[in-house]
Amino acid sequence: MAAGRAARTGLNGLFAVYKPPGVASIRVRDTVETLLLKELNSLERPAVQQQVRFLPTTVEGNAGKELTLTVTQLPVLTAHPLVKGPEFTYLKIGAGHRLDTKSSGVFVLGVGHGNKLLTDMYNAHLTRVYTVRGLFGKATDDFSDTGRLIEKTTFGKCNGRCGNKDF
């Protein structure tokens, strides 16, 4: 448990994760949290504590059967991992920004005290670079490659410098 708590207190800061297209940002965040919790809970726990109990037993003596107390050690089951459950069930993980489900790229996550740094990073208005892919001559209802095609036209006049022209 001491190793697990030390590992948990060491989980502070920012890190980057690749978010593939077709996966929601919250699912990536939840997956990272689940994997970190699984690793923390897999660390070795201390042995189950033993409790001293005095149990009554009968012993054959000179005057027949006598009642005596026998000292025994029993495990404290309230602290047993199968009864108590996992030691760690929650990690504070925040997302630096939201990426659309259809987009892919670097997804910044903050853990522990790193969540405070996410606000500073957001307020710094850092430059973001986007790479856009498109297809000339086709328009869809939601401006994505999976949307319903609503317009199709030729683009013969476009030589790579179309500007803000409507097709």
Image: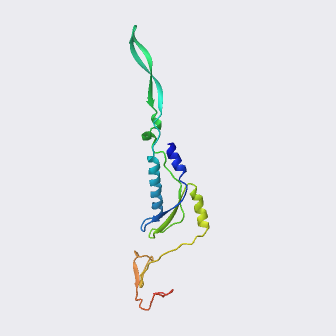
Task: Specify the quadrant that holds the C terminus.
Answer: bottom left
Q: Is residue 146 above or below residue 86?
A: below
Rendered location of residue 28, percent (x, y): 46, 61
Nearest the viewer among 150 and 145 is 145
Asked where in the image residue 67 lies, by quadrant, the reply is top left
Q: Quadrant of residue 125?
A: bottom right
Residue 164 horizontal side relative to residue 66, left or right: right
Image location (x, y in percent) of residue 4: 50, 46
Q: Residue at x 54, y 72 (%)?
A: 128
Q: Residue at position x 47%, y 55% from top?
A: 33
Residue with the most extreme bottom position: 157
Please tell me which residue is depicted at 50% across the width and 45% down the height of the picture.
3
Colour mapping:
rainbow
**136 shown above or below 40:** below
Q: Is residue 153 above or below residue 107?
A: below
Q: Residue 9 placed where, x, y %?
A: 55, 50
| On screen, residue 80 above or below 158 | above
| Residue sitting nearer the eye, 94 or 8 | 8
